[in-house]
Amino acid sequence: MTERDETEVREEEPVVVRDRRKVDPESGDLRDPEDGEAVEVPAGDLAGTEIGGAADEAEQAAPDAESELAKQLEERTADLQRVQAEYANYRRRADKEREQLAASGKASLAGDLLPLLDDVERAAQHGDLTGAFKAVADKLVEALEKAGLEPFGVEGDEFDPSVHEAVQHDTSPEVSGPTVTTVLRRGYRFGDRVLRAALVAVTDHEPGEAPADAGPAESDAVAASQPGAEVPGADAPIDPPVEGELPIDGDEQRN
């Protein structure tokens, strides 16, 4: 049979339309199920049958599927939170390292300019820092201090071996402890980092001498406190002679 003949046969077959409505559209009454028509049956009535068993299994598998989805969602959420925390920590470390590198670069540059600052300071002490040279020097010092450079080391500071380098030592009763009395070269720090220690002369307390402003009584007390020192007036009579009588020495009077 040719393709044309098959087309003519299909065109001659009648089209059958089945009305599967349960309610008669004309009378409004329920129709009886006809042979071969589909009939809706509640799922509970199909329990135990092949179709009903499949429905029960589907209902039982639904909570398991929901539990599995909830578990997967929880795992994915935990993974996302962990990734976010790791990224936040990475950003903090990167920012901190960048700040440290920037501070290290500034400190290195400031350390290279310290000899120039020493020359500027010596010129100021000799009165040679004047005019345009002084204006440029002031701008340089201001820029370095704004970047974080801080000088230290002045006369009268308490000696600190972590920031002071003692090149001269002396003693004096006028100080109560190791004290910076002369600054030979100023020290500098950049933030918490000491770029250069200050060269200083240190004077320590000398307990053997009385202070310069001490009175006679204090001087006698200090002298008497020394080992083997003689107390002034120890051999002198305690009572002066009265009307030509001989003085009584200390031993007789005590007896």
Image (cartoon, rainbow, N blue to C red):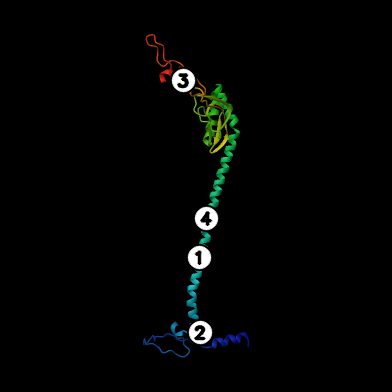
Q: Is residue 103 visible?
A: yes
Q: Which amino acid does label 4 sit on?
A: Ala
Q: Nearer the viewer, mark 2 or mark 4?
A: 4
Report how far apart the C-alphas of labels 3 and 4 lie in the structure. 75 Å
Q: Name the residue under label 1.
A: 73
Which of 159/38 is in front?
159
Check the picture and name the quadrant holding the C terminus.
top left
Q: Is mark 3 on a helix, strand or loop?
A: helix
Numbered badge on residue 85: 4
Q: Which residue is the extreme one toward the right?
A: 2
- Residue 202 in which image quadrant: top right
Q: In which quarter of the image is residue 197?
A: top right
Between disc 2 and disc 3, whose residue precedes?
Answer: 2
Q: Residue at x 52, y 35 (%)?
A: 146
Which secondary structure lies at badge 1?
Answer: helix
Task: Point out the image quarter for the N terminus.
Answer: bottom right
Tell which tag, 3 or 4, sits nearer the viewer: 3
Q: Residue 50 carries which label?
A: 2
Identify the secondary structure beneath mark 4.
Answer: helix
Residue 86 percent coordinates (x, y): 54, 55
Which residue, given by chain and number where applicable, does mark 3 sit on? 220
Q: Is residue 66 above or below residue 238?
A: below
Residue 184, given in percent of the width and then of the height, sits at: 57, 26
Residue at (41%, 18%) from the top-left corner? 253
Q: Which of marks 4 and 1 is nearer the N terminus?
A: 1
Q: Which residue lies furthest to the bottom in this view?
A: 35
Q: Which of marks 3 and 1 is in front?
A: 3
Q: What residue type is labelled 3?
A: Asp
Callout 3: few (<14), some (14-19), or many (20+) C-alpha neighbours within 10 Å? Answer: some
